[in-house]
Amino acid sequence: MTVKTATLASPAPWADRTGRALMAIDAVATLVAFTGGVMNMINASDDRLMVEGWRTFGYLVFAGMWAMLALRPRRHPGLWELILLQKIPVTIWAFAIGAVPEAQTASLIDLGLVVTTIPAYVLCRGWYSWRTTLPTPAPTQPAGATS
């Protein structure tokens, strides 16, 4: 009996390296934003302290997610999509409320993150993380047969 298995082409090495590099850049850039956030927390007034802390610690979460994707882009089902599910609406929202303090800067930064994450998703074939691996079936032998 012949068992056919479907194989999906791996991304080209240059594409995989490029996508991973984009995710590493996003991770490092987000760590830089974290350091700026720490300064904002230190200098925040009491009425801004909680929101600055929330934002600053969120940078660590996103830096970690981008680092995970840079290291293993096809091993985290839903992570690519989760990042984009947050970043795309936040970017649209920031552009929509452009005259509000911090919105213009945030819109451009988040747009940069979206513009690097989407191509990296395609280059690394991030959707492959949803694949399931089925065990290879053991060869069957008729009852009573010995090898």
Image (cartoon, helix red, strand yellow):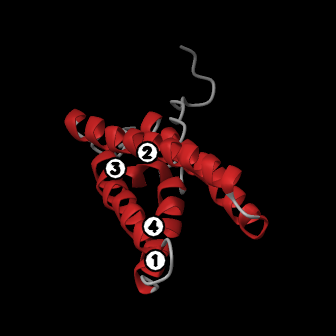
For label 2, the residue is 29
Residue 83 versus residue 125 in the image, above or below:
below
**Which residue lies at the image location 47% right of the left edge and 74% below the top edge?**
103
Q: Is residue 67 above or below residue 53?
A: above
Disc 1 element: helix
Looking at numbered disc 4 in the image, what kind of residue is underneath it? Ala
Q: Answer whether labels 3 and 4 touch (C-beta < 8 Å).
A: no
Q: Nearer the viewer, residue 9 or 137?
A: 9
Q: CA distance from mark 2 to mark 4?
A: 13 Å
Q: Judge whether residue 69 can be spotted in this image.
A: no
Earlier in the chain: of badge 3 and badge 4, it is: 4
Mark 1 crowdedness (10 Å alpha carbons): few <14, some 14-19, many ≥20: many
Q: Is residue 88 shown left or right of residue 18?
A: right
Q: CA distance from mark 4 to mark 1?
A: 6 Å
**Residue at the spot of label 3:** 125
Marks 1 and 2, how far apart in space? Answer: 19 Å
Q: Is residue 13 something one can see in this rendering?
A: yes
Name the N-terminal-most of marks 2 and 3. 2
- In this rendering, would 22 be left or right of 84? left
Give percent across and percent down for residue 117. 37, 55
Q: Position of residue 36 (x, y in %)?
A: 55, 48
Specify the quadrant that holds the N terminus. Answer: top left
